Amino acid sequence: MEIETRDIERIVRQVMAAMEQQGTIAGGAYPPAPGITAPRGDNGVFERVEDAIDAAWAAGRVWAFHYKVEDRRRVIEAIRVMARENARTLAQMVRDETGMGRVEDKVEKHLAVADKTPGVECLTTDAISGDGGLMIEEYAPFGVIGAITPSTNPTETVIHNTISMIAGGNSVVFNVHPGAKKCCAFCLQLLNKTIVENGGPANLITMQRDPTMDAVNKMTSSPKIRLMVGTGGMGMVNALLRSGKKTIGAGAGNPPVIVDDTADVKLAARELYWGASFDNNLFCFAEKEVFVMEASADGLIRGLVEQGAYLLTPAETEAIVKLALIQKDGKYEVNKKWVGKDAGLFLQAIGVSGHENTRLLICDVPKCHPYVMVEQLMPVLPIVRCRTFDECIQCSVEAEQGNRHTSSIFSTNVYNMTKFGKEIETTIYVKNGATLRGLGIGGEGHTTMTIAGPTGEGLTCARSFTRRRRCMLAEGGLRII
């Protein structure tokens, strides 16, 4: 059997990485990880967060000093292959453990992050050459990143963050949501095996087997972790921002949709049905409420029903409010037991039978209705009638609540599209399409599971998890003119 040169290089790198992490290599062209013997875990899963941090720190040193950008590219391509091959397995595991969403939609999400999460290709170098010398600016790693992930898109976020963060030259310690710890551990172990089998260092990504808030506190206080990344609710993001550690925060959203009097209501109905029902509306950027001008309202509702949506009566709407929302101190919050559940289960629970395969519930409600103002993460889409376009904008801004996350509009009026975009200020703004398209699912652009609206990075990629560094060669160096 012939062994190609690249195979020999991969084997040598794998052996060298293992030796350095065990502290058996000293000296050489690059510094080893000094003063530490990397703890041994279960393919990246550790019982203590301290060991997970130490192992990721040791692996990160190896990754940064002994691997080239082309090595990162090769490992990431192997991760993409692994993620595609295991998309259905992971989707089923997530559904089984969390009890949320739809398997077929979760498969599509896993394929999206595998195929459309950018790797090293977005780490471009800028150069300026002049009489004063040569200047280059490049994207360098932070080091170890602490990443908090949600239960709504657990393994999808782990895969996306892994690709983006190791492409930037970093290692990662995850603290996953406790409600998805088993599927995340399985996914992380698959990723680690893939990295090692393709010549990368062991423990480049790690996690504590049983995630806790104490582990998060230890991550934020550890000097080995240089950057925190939080994907989930605003409470978690704000806590990380207060930690004193540099933070990239991807918080909550309550995305409004406007359908004006110039809209193609059949298109709007088709796209809204797809987007709002996708994975039972678990995406934070999915359509959560619609503000429609009176001239288009009846046509939109009729079109949604034709697509397969179930129009709730006022009595049924209020029955589901009592089921899915909890009133506390005069305010409503989500009943977590119903997050991401099938629409048919809602109907069954309020005594409506024969609609087990229904994907989306719609209701005609006033603008002050709790469904409008609460980010519910359920396949229930409230529709609010408005007299004017300006009223649609005002209601949308109030419902979005300053999250600056996602919004969309269905219109053929360029002025209306422009005005709403300026007023709403969201990170993602989609025109005449489901908000899924704004994330590259059925649309252009890359996919991410970490949409950093609160801290301004936007749709994150490898570049988001790097430091901008400048290198200057003075005295006209390297110029030939």
Image (tube, helix red, strand yellow):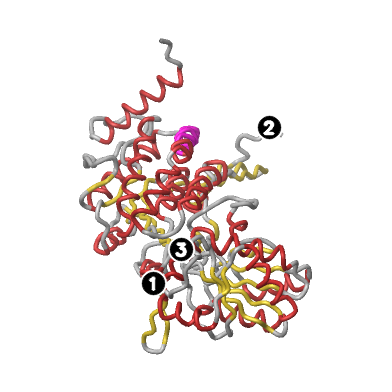
Q: Earlier in the sequence, mark 3 or mark 1?
A: 1
Type of amino acid under label 2: Ile
What crowding class fits label 2: few (fewer than 14 Cα within 10 Å), some (14-19), or many (20 or more)? Answer: few
Foreground residue among 442 and 461? 442
Foreground residue among 475 and 52? 52
Which mark is nearer the camera, 1 or 2? 1
Type of amino acid under label 3: Asp
Which mark is nearer the camera, 3 or 2? 3
Residue 283 % position (x, y): 50, 61
Task: Measure the alpha-carbon separation of dots 3 and 2.
Answer: 67 Å
Q: Secondary structure at mark 1?
A: helix
Quadrant occupied by the C terminus: top right
Marks counted in the figure total: 3
Q: Which residue is mark 3?
A: 342
Residue 401 % position (x, y): 53, 78
Q: Which residue is mark 2?
A: 480
The magenta-colored residue range is 69-79
**Contact, mark 3 vs mark 1 (Cβ under 8 Å):** no
Above or below, comparing residue 93 to residue 80 in the picture:
below
Q: Secondary structure at mark 2?
A: loop
Does the magenta segment cover residue 78?
Answer: yes
Q: Which residue is mark 1?
A: 235
